[in-house]
Amino acid sequence: MPETTRRADRPADRLPGARYGNRPTMKDVAARAGVGLKTVSRVVNGEPGVTPDTERRVQEAIDALGFRRNDSARVLRKGRTASIGLVLEDLADPFYGPLSRAVEEVARAHGALLINGSSAEDPDREQELALALCARRVDGLVVIPAGDDHRYLEPEIRAGVATVFVDRPAGRIDADVVLSDNFGGARDGVAHLIAHGHRRIGFIGDMPGIHTAAERLRGYRAAMEDAGIPVEDAWTSLGATDPERVRRAAEEMLSGSSPVTAVFTGNNRVTVTVIRVLAEQARPVALVGFDDFELADLLQPGITVVAQDAAALGRTAAERLFRQLDGTLVAPERIELPARLITRGSGELPPAA
Amino acid sequence: MPETTRRADRPADRLPGARYGNRPTMKDVAARAGVGLKTVSRVVNGEPGVTPDTERRVQEAIDALGFRRNDSARVLRKGRTASIGLVLEDLADPFYGPLSRAVEEVARAHGALLINGSSAEDPDREQELALALCARRVDGLVVIPAGDDHRYLEPEIRAGVATVFVDRPAGRIDADVVLSDNFGGARDGVAHLIAHGHRRIGFIGDMPGIHTAAERLRGYRAAMEDAGIPVEDAWTSLGATDPERVRRAAEEMLSGSSPVTAVFTGNNRVTVTVIRVLAEQARPVALVGFDDFELADLLQPGITVVAQDAAALGRTAAERLFRQLDGTLVAPERIELPARLITRGSGELPPAA
DNA sequence: CGTGCATCTGACAACGTTGTCCAGGCTCTA
DNA sequence: TAGAGCCTGGACAACGTTGTCAGATGCACG
């Protein structure tokens, strides 16, 4: 129960039913300034053709009434909203903060507002949200897909809504996509472990239906195959990334008949859980994780990771979106940004018996 | 330079100039279905009074044309937008992720969309953003203040825009505020250090102009005074929280003529920097930080913190906002949520010579 | 078969803004 | 001083939707 303190008990001077119906309009301003409606519009929009004296009178009326242009009406009239939508999985996930921020910066640079919502990894909710944004007539849409079928956006794209998918490819629709090199990053991370002498390497990742998870698994397998190491079934674990399952998976592959000496983790949530498990082990186990996270360098040992550049993903996607709006772009592309290995200690541990 | 791969080079079948002017409207749907305009509106909004047969015809026309209601026009007509705005400091700051997410959840529960933007701690930008949102006629506004004068929102509030300030109080305006108990939390944290035998305790915080920083400093002083410990000037450092300054401040108070044996840090950024400095020290130094952060428990030792509940802040603010919109609320209140101490080791270290 | 009623449908205005276009007043020149 | 041309200001329609209200249709009943 929040502890509350009354600050002011003065009677309400704000009418309860006063929505914004009673807001002053340009008409009101015009009446007060004794000019025509369009003249007010001109002043508000800084259009030429108004004498300084008239402008001053209008400005005074605006200030006196507290007038603020109604952008809904403006949008209706002009056709463009100067806003873009961002549909992501979970605002609370630290990976999406910088991404969202980067998209916002680009939007701001183009004079647009950002409207966003979380899909909570639910395809239905993603669709609901994306379509709600389209109904608002956002000029463009940046989507981090939760589902794998985006045909529902076809009419919107045809109608001119610029659309870019980020982090995961769009499903069953031809559109711009900006991704990290999940395959290459995972392959490099696993190769790094192999280079440090490991041969029994575990992989714990997300559900294989998720594109990024599948790609990272593919990278793991490729690195192992390149090194001529056959992968045992017990070494890979795919599924939900809740801490319990991940913990069980880690413990299993650390204790079987041929226990792994190193683990590659498929995303930051998994990595964090595995760190906890490894901390309880008697012998040191090497670890490389996909996705960087704050303080990874402060742990003992520091955690070696394959880092995606979340901000670059967002920036690239947003810039591409605005280039679609410019008309500069025509054919959809698939853009892959490199992921890079950051060594901090945990990935350089030698294999322990 | 991003590495790019062409995916499809088929000629554009999307007209470059096709904004959304060519979107089908209810009129188009009506024409195609051979019914009146209003009937389409009824079907779209699920209003009663349409025969199943007519409804089916309309629905078919809608699907065939890919019609989507234009919410801008709807908003203009109805007066409410079913959207709220969130103005925060920095989406990339992990503290605001959960807060933003909580606000969004509540908004969603009320059928509203969330529009947000970052002020980047710039008061001008905060104002610009807040007013832009008002121009969009958001129904309400959740603001994490960057500036300390919010009188610019008075006309908006009078016009019926529900407004709640979070994390810091509003400046020079009477409005709802939801805060953490910064004073009490800091006092408890410092008292905790004192209880573990420390007397020479340092405080490193943000600029004293920031309300939260001032409150936390006040809490520090109160705890020291309660214990009858005079505070030496060299023990407190207030100012920008960039790593260099914080590092210098920490090193100074650890090396002076009466070096501190414990440090209380004023926010998570400061805490992280101080952790790095302490890791380089020969003798152990106790640490309690304001704000929790991920992995604080995995460090050696775990970091004892005074944790705010960011999600609760967001939730409380958003719920209050919607209650303002309901008309349930009248007088502005100031709500303080408790902060709680989480002990993990670093705050329980005894004083070392 | 006419009346009354309930149900369904559509014409019309309005929301607040901007684009178009024309009127009126001014200055400048012949 | 008259005419041409420019500049400022305003009337009006349109954007796509919803609320109001009245008309049309069908049916039951007297």
Image (spheres, coloured by chain):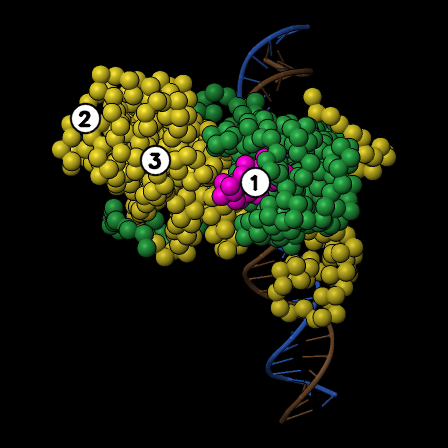
Chain colours: A green, B yellow, C blue, D brown
Q: Check the residue under mark 2 and report the chain it is in.
A: B
Q: Is residue A338 magenta?
A: no
Which mark is drawn over residue B231? Answer: 2
Residue located beneath label 3 in the image: B346
Mark positioned earlier in the residue sequence (2 or 3):
2
Residue at (54, 36) in percent of width and height: A284
Give the camera-side residue of B252 and A116: B252
The answer to whether tags 2 and 1 share a subunit is: no
Q: Position of residue A108 (x, y in %)?
A: 56, 29
Residue at (57, 52) in percent of width and height: A248
Element carrying mark 3? loop
User: Label 2 vs label 1: CA separation?
Assistant: 43 Å
Which mark is drawn over residue A338? Answer: none
Q: Position of residue B239 (x, y in %)?
A: 33, 22
Q: Position of residue A245 (x, y in %)?
A: 58, 52
Look at label 3 and name its amino acid.
Answer: Ser
Residue located beneath label 1 in the image: A271
Q: Residues within 10 Å of mark 2 (few under 14, many from 20)?
A: some
Could you tell me if the residues under marks 2 and 1 are in contact, i.e. CB atoms within 8 Å? no
Span shown in magenta: A264-287
Determine the residue located farthest toward the right in the rendered image: B10
Residue at (53, 23) in percent of width and height: A50
Determine the residue located farthest toward the left in the rendered image: B228
Q: Position of residue A226 (x, y in %)?
A: 77, 32
